[in-house]
Each structure stands twice: as structure tokens, then as C-alpha cells.
Amino acid sequence: MIKVGVNGYGTIGRRVADAVRLQKDMELVGVTKTKPDYRSRLAVGKGIPLYAVDMKSMEGFKAAGYAVKGTVNDLLQRVDVVVDAAPDDIGAENKKLYSQAGVKAIFQGGEEHEVAGISFCAQCNFEKAVGKQFVRVVSCNTTGLCRTLHAIDEGVGIAKARAVLARRAADPDEVGKGPIDAVVLDPTTLPSHHGPDVQTVLEGMNVVTMAFKVPTTHMHLHSLLLTLKKPATKEQVVQSLEKAPRIQLVDGKSGFKSTAQVIDLAREMGRPRGDTYEATVWRDSVTVLDGEAYMFLGVHQEAIVVPEDIDAIRALYGGYSREQSMMLTDESLGIVHR
Ligand code: NAD
């Protein structure tokens, strides 16, 4: 059993913790929390051992009547791998703790590539992380782009990729974030950070991205414009997407007119929290014109990196092939392999 801890129990941490609990070869040793709120109560209710992020937060838990098992330093003594799911840039600070404890650690996409030196997307570069101490799972948008570009590059070859990202403004519980009534250029200059981030995984991919934020909380939507290396048909592009894992194809004529129906599908399938782990490509948007392929790609920001974190745990621990790990992860999460 791989002993796993999760440091940071927010949007990503809670999902990764639940996914770890579904793995037959992993034990969730505990999660850290900063304060005793309803999420702490729910974690305890699930039987998840709670740890405080530091001594000060431990006092808060004790005062609220929680029996915490210790601080993050105690958790680190008991695990093989820790998944850092703390807010952006806090992971880089936490790295000192992991180095001191000699524990393997996974960082999230809110950290710089340099925090680990390896950026990870399982189906693209699992092998690079095998046996290493640190790895960074790339952000939600970068994961969606990496899966899709990798699949089409393997299938028909990409000479140049361009992507325009309409980004969700905030996660559903982030009440303090906006915009409420604007489209925000994110940033006003090009490229957005996503293109260079894709290149930390798909080295050599010629990709330029631009992004803006829209007032929605569920899912990002990318418009992809790809110059192909050689002539290909729409069917060949679709086939390369169908062959790749963790990409689902949906159609407008089946009722998928927006991101809302993608989330609705996940809810109706009984996915926890309505999570869509797959990159979602609209099959009927795939169009090839004059050597260029076009398509829409949806990314459920809260969920898409969850299977990647689980595979990253196995990669760091060692002893698994990419195929073995992805199959175990996907079976446990209900991700269908065609
Ligand atoms: P979040 O704010 O929802 O959760 C972070 C949690 O960490 C909170 O519960 C916070 O209280 C806790 N925390 C604060 N300080 C801490 C510390 N010192 N040590 C441990 N925990 C601490 O954030 P999130 O959205 O889950 O993002 C976590 C990481 O995942 C970021 O790097 C982010 O960029 C990345 N990510 C987020 C999304 C997304 O859409 N939310 C998608 C992909 C990747």
C-alpha cells in the first residue's frame, strides 16, 4: 500500500483525497486543514484523519473539540507521498517541509514548473516522473490542452497549435472573485501562460495561447486552431481523439449545446460532485479546412487533474507502468476506456 497524505483540503485536495480512498493500492493517511469548518466535520464523518497545517491552527481545532492527529510535520512522518493542494505559491513554500522530511511530493499547476523540474500529464510523460522525489501536475487548462494536442499530434501530426481560452472566472464557492459583468482579458498581452506551460510537458510543441475570463463557474472552453503537418480528414482527427484515453467526445445534436450539459451528464451519471475528469471535445465542431483543424474543447477545472494526481502518486512511488496506473485510476473513477 502506498501511504498518501494530502496537504490542503480545498477544491482539488478534497477530490484527490476521495480518489486516493478509492485506490486498492493506496491508503489515505490523513489530510491537513487550516481551520475547523464544515469541511473538517465532513472529513471526520468520512473517517479521514485530520492534521492541522501548523501549531496555531492545531489550537483552533482543539478549541473546537476536534481530535487532530498532529501537524503537517507529523503527517509527513507517516506517508510515502504527499499531494500538495495548497493555494497558488504556497506549495513552493511547503517544499521545504517535504525536503526536510525526505518525502516525495506532488505539486499543483498553481506552482511554477521549477518547483519540481518535471511537469506531468500521465498520458504524455508518465515515465519522466517514475521514482523521482518531486513532480508538478499541470493546471486544468494545460492538462486539457496536453491530452488533446498529444492525441492529435500522435494521430495526424501538428505543425502549429493556437488556442483561445474562455476561462471560468471562479470556482462555485469562491464568492469573492469576479467578474460579475465583464469579459476580462487574461492577460491583455500574448501569449497567456498556458502555451509555455504546455511546452513543459509537450516539449517542442509549437503552441500559442490567448485567454479571457467570463462570468461563469463551471468549466473553461477552448477554441483550438491547429495547422496539421500533412493533409488529414475530419474522420482521422476524430479517430485520433477517440483512441486517446481521458478524452470524451460529445455532439451538439445529442443535446450538448454548452458546458452546462457536460456537467449535467456527469451529475446524471452519479459522478461525485458532478465531476468530469475527461477533456471534452465537441465531435461536430471538429472541422478540417485547408490543412487546418478546428474544434471546441471543454475543461472541468475542479476535476480534470484528479486522475493525473493519482497517476503521479504511482509514478513517484515507482513499480507501475503508465498503462497499469492509468487503468487502475480510470477503473476506480469510472472513466471509460474505449
Ligand atoms: P483552494 O483554495 O480551494 O484550496 C486550498 C486549501 O489549502 C484551502 O483549504 C486552504 O485553507 C488550504 N491552505 C492554506 N494554506 C495552507 C498551507 N500553508 N498548507 C496547506 N494548506 C493550506 O485551492 P484549489 O483551487 O484547490 O487549488 C489548489 C492548487 O491546485 C493550486 O495550485 C491551483 O492552482 C491548482 N488547481 C486548481 C484548480 C481549480 O480550478 N480550482 C484546477 C487545477 C489546479
Image (spheres, rainbow, N blue to C red):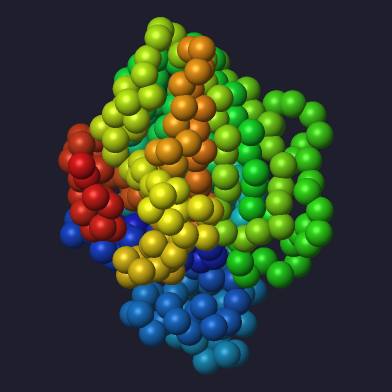
Quadrant where the image shows the C terminus: top left
Q: Quadrant of residue 279?
A: top left
Q: Nearer the viewer, residue 117 or 308?
A: 308
- Picture coordinates of residue 262, whole percent (x, y): 45, 56
Q: Is residue 89 toward the left or the right of residue 11 in the image?
A: right
For ligand 1, the image quadrant comes to bottom right
Q: Quadrant of residue 35?
A: bottom right
Residue under the image location 78 percent in, 62 percent down: 180
Tell me: residue 250, above or below residue 1: above
The number of callouts visible is 0
Q: Is residue 31 visible?
A: no
Tell me: residue 200, above or below residue 188: above
Q: Is residue 52 visible?
A: yes
Q: Is residue 72 toward the left or the right of residue 223 in the image?
A: left
Q: Quadrant of residue 122?
A: top left
Q: Nearer the viewer, residue 105 or 171?
A: 171
Residue under the image location 57 percent in, 59 percent down: 218
Residue under the image location 44 percent in, 65 percent down: 264
The residue most toward the top is 230
Q: Is residue 121 toward the left or the right of residue 56 in the image?
A: left
Tell me: residue 150, above or below residue 292: below
Residue under the image location 40 percent in, 38 percent down: 283
- Picture coordinates of residue 333, whole percent (x, y): 28, 58
Q: Nearer the viewer, residue 78 or 324?
A: 324
- Picture coordinates of residue 132, whole percent (x, y): 36, 34
Quadrant where the image shows the N terminus: bottom left
Q: Is residue 39 toward the left or the right of residue 69 in the image?
A: right
